Image (spheres, rainbow, N blue to C red):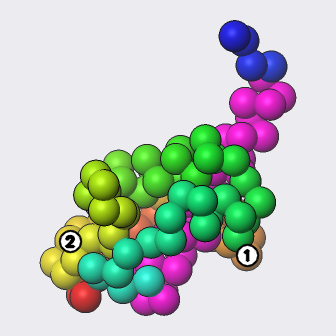
Amino acid sequence: MNVPAAAGKKRSSLSQGLEALLSGQILEGRLRGGEQLPTESALMLEHGVSRTVVREAMSRLQAAGMVETRHGIGTFVRGRRVMWQGEVATPSTGEPVRFLETLKA
């Protein structure tokens, strides 16, 4: 099944927005190392997005080294001494921000 380009872009921007929101919470310390993230279902309800959007955002956070998924258990913020490097959009302006940071749990 082919998805129209506009729909794909909308889903992508939604997943980027959720990724930016969650990464911002992690970088600001509102979500700490070792803390479990809400379930896919909870994130879907809280943010009014589809499961695909949540999974794409989680995949990006995982690729950036910010979270780890333990199959059958949940997704957790990576613990202390983890180096994260990447680029996220700031929630307030949407401008990309590059970072290289060591977070302590």
Instruction: Please state the total of marks drawn on the protein image.
Output: 2
Q: Residue at x 83, y 29 (%)?
A: 6
Instruction: Say if the magenta span includes residue 11.
Output: yes
Which SS type dominates the magenta stretch? helix
Extreme residue in the front direction = 72
Out of 95 and 105, give the one closest to the viewer. Answer: 105
Residue 66 in picture, x, y percent from top left: 35, 65
Most extreme residue toward the top is 1
The residue that mark 2 highlights is 82
- Confirm whether residue 85 shows in the render: no
Q: Which residue has dot 1 on it?
A: 92
Q: Position of residue 22 (x, y in %)?
A: 54, 70
Horizontally, residue 104 falls left or right of residue 90, namely: left
Which x, y percent locates residue 60? Answer: 45, 49
- Quadrant of residue 19 in the image? bottom right
Residue at left offset 72%, top offset 12%:
2
In magenta, the rendered stretch is 5-30
- The residue mark sitting in front, 1 or 2, is 2
Which residue sits at x=20%, y=71%?
A: 82
The three-letter code of the residue at mark 1 reads Ser
Q: Badge 1: few (under 14), some or many (20 or more) residues near its Cα, within 10 Å? A: few
Give x and y (percent) for residue 38: 50, 71
Is residue 86 rendered magenta in the image? Answer: no
In this rendered view, identify the residue nearer to me: 27 or 59. Answer: 59
Q: Secondary structure at mark 2?
A: strand
Quarter occupied by the C terminus: bottom left
- Mark 1 vs 2, N-terminal side: 2
